[in-house]
Each structure stands twice: as C-alpha cells, then as structure tokens.
Amino acid sequence: MAALEQDTQAYLYDAEDPEHLRRLNIAAGQPAGYAIYAPLLAMRQWKPTDLLKAKIKTYIESKLKWKPRGSDDIGAELFLHFGELFITLKFGHDHAKVKLLEIEKH
C-alpha cells in the first residue's frame, strides 16, 4: 500500500463511492484518450544489463552472504508488486525477493 501512496500516477478506486464507480466504468470502456496502464513485464524475456549484473553480484555478496563461484548460475527475474519493481534472486536452493532500487544502490 505504501508504494501506491507514493505513486503520483496511481488511483485506487472505492467501489462504495458513486463517483469512483462512474470513473471505473469509463476506464473499463477504454475510450479514446483515456490512458490505461498495465504491467507488461510478463510479455517479454528480461535479462539484466552488465552493470546491473555487477550490482547484483555486489548485493549478493554484501547483503545475502551467498558465495557463488564464477561458474555458478545466479537466477534473476524481474516482477512488479504494487507498482514497484522487484527482482527474485536464486542461487541453488536459496532465493530472495529484493526491491530493484536496493540493488541499484550498490
């Protein structure tokens, strides 16, 4: 909910409010000029850039204390949660869900 409160573009409808229901019905009709935003991450394969790979490696070593070797595969999947980007990191049987912003800070 905090991510929604900080998103200046977000709008949370209240189904009990007649004005909100009116706006929701307009949005559902998808009229020309009425912008509808949807997460499209699932429609394409995502791969981290080389810079982000380096930041993921630094994050894993400093925050998660995982010790992958050079040949070890680290899985990284991007996903959207309440309008905020996260990465699921996987190494062996371990996994962690981390805000993309936290990794980008490293």
Image: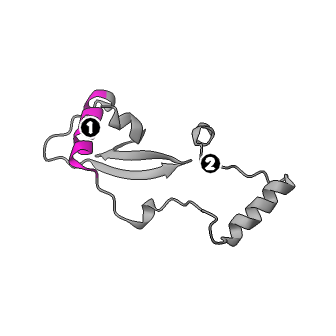
Residue, disc 1? 55
Main secondary structure type of the part rendered in magenta: helix
For badge 1, the amino acid type reads Lys
Residue for point 59% across, 48% down: 9
Read off the magenta span. 48-62
Task: Tell me the quarter of the image containing the N terminus.
Answer: top right
Residue, disc 2? 10
Q: Is residue 29 above or below residue 39?
A: below
Residue 58: image x %, image y %? 25, 33
Q: Quadrant of residue 105?
A: top left
Q: In this view of the protein, which residue sits in the foreground, 71 or 92? A: 71
Residue for point 29% across, 55% down: 47
Can residue 68 be spotted in the picture? Answer: yes
Residue 23 falls left or right of residue 7: right
**In the image, residue 93 lies in the stretch drawn in magenta:** no
Residue 20: image x %, image y %? 79, 55
For badge 2, the amino acid type reads Ala
Can residue 93 be spotted in the picture? Answer: no
Dot 1 or dot 2, earlier in sequence: 2
Q: Is residue 36 above or below residue 81?
A: below
Residue 15 falls left or right of residue 33: right
Residue 59 falls left or right of residue 5: left
